[in-house]
Image (spheres, grey):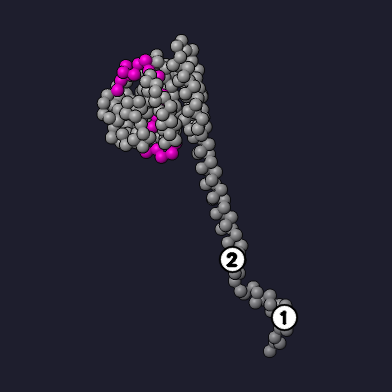
Amino acid sequence: MKPSSSNPEKQNSVEANSNPAVPDESTSLTRRELIGAICLGLAFASVTVVLAFFSGSRKKAALPPGHLDTPRQLVAFNLTDRSGRSVTQAELAGRILVVNFVFTSCLLSCRAVNDRMEEIQRLVADWADVQLLSLTVDPRTDTPSVLAKFADSFHADTNRWLFLTGNKPELYDLIETSFIPKSPELEDLIPGGFTNTDRIMLVDQKGSVFASFNGLNRGVVSDVLTQIEKLRKPNNTK
């Protein structure tokens, strides 16, 4: 008979080798947290890139404040007011037009710009030669009745402040030719893919679209009023 081993170090080594390795839970958890952090970082990076892309597109196409370097001309149109009556370009000839762009499903920026328009309406109440126009970029949704409800929320005078909709091709041709451009990148975000829908624009008595203002700027009302006052003066030079 062989004597049993009395070497405790050897025995411990054998027992250690016979037991399967147990994973360290704290190490495993740390790795999961690291992977999660990496994924979250990639997600934030993707969102940042997308926002930067659209911001860059808007900035590139942005209209300058104040006078336009190349004034446009108001093209002929026949559209429908919120009351259901037809409104033509010829009918508005000789008036100063203050124009903005709406789509009633827009909850924030559109309402802010219309707040400015409401203030302008109040300040030009005694000037019969000044007309406010809001053109929808979403004629499919913004029917006359929908626009009527929207206009009422801004106390729009039915004679002084017109909300216009109509046939999409004609309406879009008017907006793009006379006022603001389109951008393919925005077609899934804004009806018609129009850029600069936050603008307030001025048309003089001869139908020249000559000025563009940031309608989200709280101080824009005084700038618009200054230009209107210049247009109303005899022999104005804008």
The stretch drawn in magenta includes residue 105? yes
Q: Amino acid at mark 1?
A: Pro
Q: Residue furthest top?
A: 235
Relative image position of residue 26 (x, y in whole percent): 61, 64
Q: CA distance from mark 2 to mark 1?
A: 30 Å
- Do tag 2 and tag 1 residues touch (Cβ < 8 Å)? no
The stretch drawn in magenta includes residue 212? no
Which callout, 2 or 1, points at the residue further toward the start of the chain? Answer: 1
Residue shown at 37% from the left, 23% from the top: 131
Q: Is residue 166 or residue 85 the one in the foreground?
A: 85
Examine the image and state in which quarter residue 143 appears. Answer: top left
Of the numbered discs in the image, which one, if any, rests on residue 82?
Answer: none
Q: Which residue is mark 2?
A: 25
Q: Which residue is mark 1?
A: 8
Q: Is residue 122 or residue 153 the one in the foreground?
A: 122
Relative image position of residue 78 (x, y in whole percent): 29, 22
Element under label 2?
helix
Residue shown at 59% from the left, 66% from the top: 25
How dense is the environment of label 1, judged by Cα within 10 Å: few (below 14), some, or many (20 and up)? Answer: few
Magenta segment:
87-109
Q: Amino acid at mark 2?
A: Glu
Relative vertical location of residue 194 with respect to residue 11 in this rendering, above or below? above
Question: Can residue 80 be seen?
Answer: yes
Element under label 1?
helix
Taking the image as shown, residue 92 lies to the left or right of residue 54, namely left
